[in-house]
Amino acid sequence: TVVAEVWAEVLGAERVGAHQDFFTLGGDSIAGLKVVSRLRTRLGAELSPRTLFDHPTVASLAAAVDAAPAGNGPASGGPVPRAPRDGALPLSFAQERLWFLDEFAPGSGEYNVVTTLRLTGALDLPALRTAVAGLVARHEALRTTFTPVDGRGTQTVHAHLEVPVRVAEPGSAEEADAALRAEAIRPFDLRTGPLIRVLLVRDAPGASPDGATLMLTLHHIVTDGWSMGIVARELSELYASAVRGTAPGLPALPAHYPDYAAWQRARLTDTALEPHLAYWRHQLDGLPVMDLPTDRPRPAVRSGRGALHSFPVPREVAVALGEAARRRGATLSMALTAVTQLVLARHGGQSDLAVGTAVSGRDHTELEGLVGFFVNTLVLRSRIDEAAGFGALLDQVRGTTLAAFAHQEVPFSRLVEELAPDRDPSRTPLVQAAVTLQNAPRDSFALPGLLVEETLPPVETTPFDLNVEFEPRPDDGLFAVVSYSTDLYEAATVARLAGHWLELATRLATGDPERPLREVPMLGPAEQAEALTAAEGRATGS
């Protein structure tokens, strides 16, 4: 009964049958994480993140819960304890990595997280200022700065931190664009803060009289993708309440980010991490560097400069890819990873390669409503055999991903220390490309009296050589965004790679899963004709 109630709660279903499949009902890895977290809390059972994948019906999962060992301590559902506020507050492992990077090379905008909203209508500026102040007051992460103590970073949570809503009124569309671009890359000072900025850029004269662009910029050390969904939901509620002159209906937060950081530090000792590190040492032993062909020589020191290329994945392709995955007991995210790895393998001529992927790091119910930096990077390694079919590749990616989930407690920074102590400054450690399905809960901004449209920000940085992110769309399609290093790639090269991805995904999703991969082309009809003409020319010597 409890399992069925939790499923219905997480999936938004009225009722769930005992033998219905979780993933057929629309569940994914994020929803699965919520289910496991809630069952730990309600039933006190020690469940791993992969339990639901191995037991995808209510009946089988209930049996697994009965057989699971009883948990004890916060890792198994106990509350995250309140950290004492009478001394230095530690950084989480994820924060510590970004703090060290900032200490080593301050003044970078590489870790700015930017959201841009196109607003049409009469904006209530005082209400917006009230909403921003309310959001900052609600989340300690947004009132945090970082102070070095004895060579280590610590968190300083301020009782009050003023975050102004700045307004720009440019004289031309070019000036408006320049203001947004400058804001997106302007660095933060981690020591003084605030680490959130709000800029409203009015439309230039001659454009829409009631149009503007609202840009929210946060440093990654206090936010992540899941957090930005919380920001959207709560800023909308706070703005609406300010417009109406009523109290916002937001629930009290059961914990704050510094509590999580202290709890994580106390829990993830070297002894606790050793079994997980042993897995990663074996899994990544002998991992080659991904070496894709580039348009320009790789610089001696990676700069982080980047640009974006976006493309839609049509509904029929996204749905077919998800169905192909479900037939193998996998998720859409796993299918996207498999297709991306195959494209990269073909472009680089490598059959053994790894990509990074992001996991939410929120395997505890108290963390679901917090703004903060919880996300962790997992390394997914595949050995691609083009004599096998897409089904075999999906099976491999599924197994690799579930094993990575089981060992996700290891912070990426700790993994780098363990496996890549000798850094190559021209590359990111361990993985040079990443692929992520952004399926974390993501509410849209809804501001009364305004038409709000989220737009692509003017991003000029990238965390990897190539970073592919997919976001679900209401029509069941996907919106893909590739951020890429402009030190290495021309825009046309990335556009061509995106075209190869879409062509390959379409063929794999709708084709025979046992057909050898080497028989599935990734070139579209025009490129195939061009390649054939070139080959005939070489054969005749012309």
Image: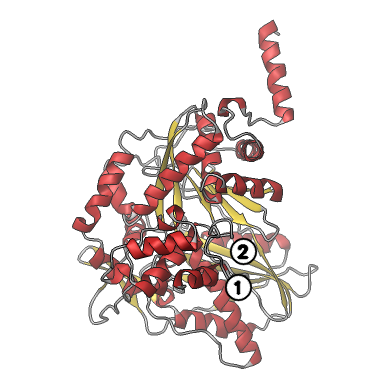
Q: Residues within 10 Å of mark 1 (few under 14, many from 20)?
A: few
Residue nearest the observer in this picture, 315 or 451 = 315
Residue at 36% in and 72% down: 43
Give residue 225's mark: none
Residue at the farthest right position: 206
- In-image side of 43 versus 465 (left or right): left
* Image location of residue 28, percent across then percent down: 53, 57
- Which image quarter: residue 152? bottom left
Question: What amino acid does circle 1 point to?
Answer: Glu
Give residue 14's mark: 1
The CA distance from mark 1 to mark 2 is 48 Å
On-image quarter of the C terminus: top right
Residue at 40% in and 74% down: 366
Residue at 40% in and 58% down: 49
- In-image side of 215 versus 407 (left or right): right
Q: Secondary structure at mark 2?
A: helix
Residue nearest the observer in this picture, 141 or 476 = 476
Vertical relation: 508 (above or below) 9: above
* Image location of residue 333, percent across then percent down: 53, 50
Cβ–Cβ below 8 Å for labels 1 and 2?
no
Q: Secondary structure at mark 1?
A: loop
Residue at 37% in and 78% down: 255
Question: What amino acid does circle 2 point to?
Answer: Ala
Vertical relation: 30 (above or below) 82: above
Give residue 179's mark: 2
